[in-house]
Amino acid sequence: MKLIIANWKMYLGVKDSVRLAKNIVAGKNQVIVCPSFVAIPEVKKALGKGVKLGAQNVSWQESGALTGEVSAGMLVELGCRYVIVGHSERRRFLAESDFVVREKLKAVLAKKIIPILCVSDLSELKILNQLVINDLIVAYEPVWAIGTGKTPTMEEIADMHKKIRARAGKSIKKLLVIYGGSVEEKNLKNILALPEVDGVLIGGASTTLSSLKKILQ
């Protein structure tokens, strides 16, 4: 069984998110859907059996005067069991630092949500130091591969996953290492065939029904 995470980013409104969610069949794989904040309540109602709900972002604080932020506690109320933390788009466009990502991890872990930590290289794993983590999903996403249609070779993906597991796995009870970055129908089979890869994090390719159905087959 492999893990398929659909990150719908800011591509879909509520109606389109619900329409897509109603047609998701997990099949033999574990599937997590991460819609936009505004679509989460309706998507939760629409998801079929076995499909899990996640969020794309979370605040590093649990409450307070933080206009526009959504706390880990609020995500729990909405039924989210997973949340993406440290995505390169937030680092690049919203200037999220390692400090902020680490604080978000702490906030998420305190509410027993499973984090999907995005990293582009091994150095970013230092934010895990001295954190007590039972369940963690690490998504390896080379910055240059996101949205470009380019991916590392299969050998490079396998090698990096081995290194991530060796670096991060010593103190974590359950660790999954997945790949993200221009994952599409044409390369999905080869990536998932790698024994070092536990699954994939898919962006734009997961936002149309025809593409998503082929991915989940």
Image (spheres, rainbow, N blue to C red):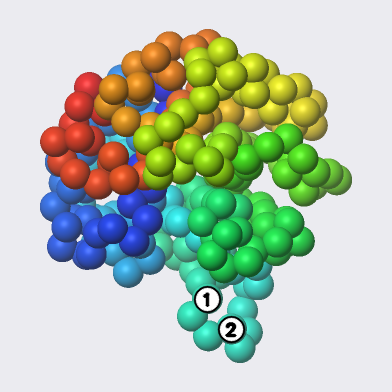
- Tag 2: amino acid: Leu
Q: Residues within 10 Å of mark 2 (few under 14, many from 20)?
A: few
Q: Residue at x 53, y 11 (%)?
A: 195
Q: Secondary structure at mark 1?
A: loop
Residue 178: image x %, image y %? 52, 29
Residues at circles 1 and 2 in contact by the CB criterion of under 8 Å: yes
Residues 162 and 18: in front is 162
- Tag 1: amino acid: Glu
Q: Is residue 154 left or right of residue 174?
A: left
Give the CA distance from mark 1 to mark 2: 6 Å
Residue 157: image x %, image y %? 56, 21
Q: Residue at x 76, y 61 (%)?
A: 99
Position of 166 relative to 124 (above/below)? above
Residues 163 and 35: in front is 163
Residue 14: image x %, image y %? 22, 64
Q: Is residue 94 left or right of residue 190?
A: right
Q: Which residue is mark 1?
A: 69
Position of 36 relative to 53 (above/below)? below
Q: Which residue is mark 2?
A: 66
